[in-house]
Amino acid sequence: MAGSLRRLLHGSTAVAVLAALCAGVAPAGAQGASSAIIDGARLHQPIDGFGFSEAFARADIMRGSEGLSAPKQRELLDLLLSRTGGAGLSILRLHIVSTPASSIQPVDPGGPNAEPQYVWDGDDESQVWLAKEAKAYGVERFYANAWSAPGYMKTNGDEANGGTLCGLSGTSCASGDWRTAYADYLVKYAEFYAGEGIRVTDLGFTNEPDYTATYSSMRFTPAQAVEFTKVLGPIAAKAGLAVACCDSFGWNHQRPYTTAIEADPVARDLVATHTGHTYASPVTGPLPTTRPTWMSEWSPNGTTWNENWDDGSGYDGITIAQAVHTALTTGNAAGYVYWYGASVGATRGLIQMNGDGYRVSKRLWALANYSRFIRPEATRIGATTGDANLSLSAFRNPDGSLAVVALNTGSSAVPVSYSLPNTGVTKGAAIPYLTDGTHDTAAQAPVRIGDGGFTATVPARSLVTYRINTGSRS
């Protein structure tokens, strides 16, 4: 074949075609390829990172309370946190436990103005162990989040089943006003972690304030969230903590909370990050704030454990890939925090633990194609294509490297010709990492970059991340 090509083509054109064929890809600008533009001059949101939680004693299970051995623990930690063989997650969400068995103040000290009676076991349902492990992998973002205040601080006297913090507008409690005591309690939790060598960076006082659960839960209206923000904010700031709010049950359900905070000049300055879940409503656009926003909790509905990439169940891997893409590009989210990293039974977590064994879902690798390659302090940059089946996003990392993520939701492979204006990249190689039914964020043969672009094929129903290193620049 090479001899025939040499007779047909001459000079630099022949060399370019032969080099591309040897690399297993068509040359840039190949006929029939969809075009895509990765524009380094179009700047979108900075990225804080991607994360997970092991709340409700899941960290205990990971640590071995149900039989997981030390070698298996390490394998799970690598899968979640390693930047070479795993997802490289960079945010750990910590559960500020409010049950009497594990709370840092399990018993009413005698009222909101009494001397606090804090206790600390140095373990926190193994979350301290997990945080230290995460830190060793390079995690620097620790989000401590309360689902509820202790029951004695609430209108219903129970840390579960809703109720509201005593002292907020609209409440009446014989025990008095617990707002400042609750703020001090939250900050004390972070101080205990500091004593263990873990710096809590973000502090949340509510989780799903618009939903009453039979487990730990507490209600806030948007106005009450603003009110408490103005109590907690100065106390948290003095301790070097940034306030996050409000982890509403749905992304669009978060809008009234963000709107209320933004409308109050004091609260607006005190909330550093706006956080919303996507159970009750999906991401349909940005939240109404210029502050960073996080999709701070979600896993899809489902009734069985599922390891598949693409089965139409709605809780397979490709579902997660689409959700992450939408949060980043439609929602302009700076952070994406999945619910459980590892859990048990019919979990929709990334990993299923079972005694001294575990199984990995394609959900993990769908997230890994983003989280391993898009690092904290990256910036999302322009990424456009006219192909309706191709969901495209691109990011410049702090080290100058680029991550270009292409999700093909169509039933046919798509050859794509990428141009890289304003990125400083004119030559070198893009390394594709493929996730589909048979690949798990698997490195593929490098693709040649020439004349400020490259052409490569995205397989049908697949997710490909192209990593372009700083050395690929002119």
Image (tube, helix red, strand yellow):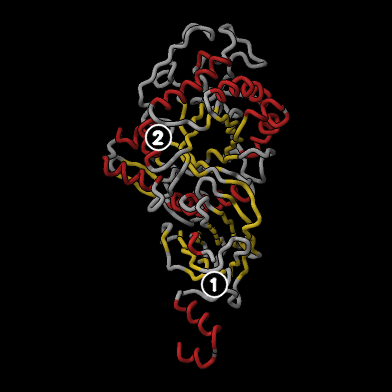
Closer to the camera, 431 or 177? 431
Q: CA distance from mark 2 to mark 1?
A: 43 Å
Q: Element at badge 2?
A: helix
Q: Give the residue displayed 66% in from the left and 25% down from the top.
A: 226
In this rendering, the answer to whether 267 lies above or below 289 is above
Q: Looking at this view, name the residue that lies furthest to the bottom.
A: 7
Q: In this rendering, does residue 181 appear at all?
A: yes
In x, y percent, where is residue 89?
Answer: 45, 45
Position of residue 229 relative to residue 402, above or below, is above
Checking the image for residue 148, the label placed there is none
Q: Farthest front residue?
A: 474
Residue 168 location, quadrant: top right
Q: Residues within 10 Å of mark 1 (few under 14, many from 20)?
A: some
Placement of 61 over or under 448, stated as above or below: above
Please, what secondary structure does the residue beneath circle 1 have? loop
- Percent of width and height locating residue 202: 52, 32
Q: In the rendering, which numbered label is found on residue 131? A: 2
Q: Amino acid at mark 1?
A: Gly
Q: Is residue 357 left or right of residue 43?
A: left
Q: Tell me the residue at 56%/7% (across/down).
A: 175
Crowding at mark 2 (Cα within 10 Å: few <14, some 14-19, many 20+):
many
Look at 45% across and 25% down and name the residue there: 97
Q: Which mark is residue 450?
A: 1
User: Which numbered disc, 2 or 1, marks the residue closer to the eye?
Assistant: 1
Provide residue 451's location: percent of width, then percent of height. 58, 72
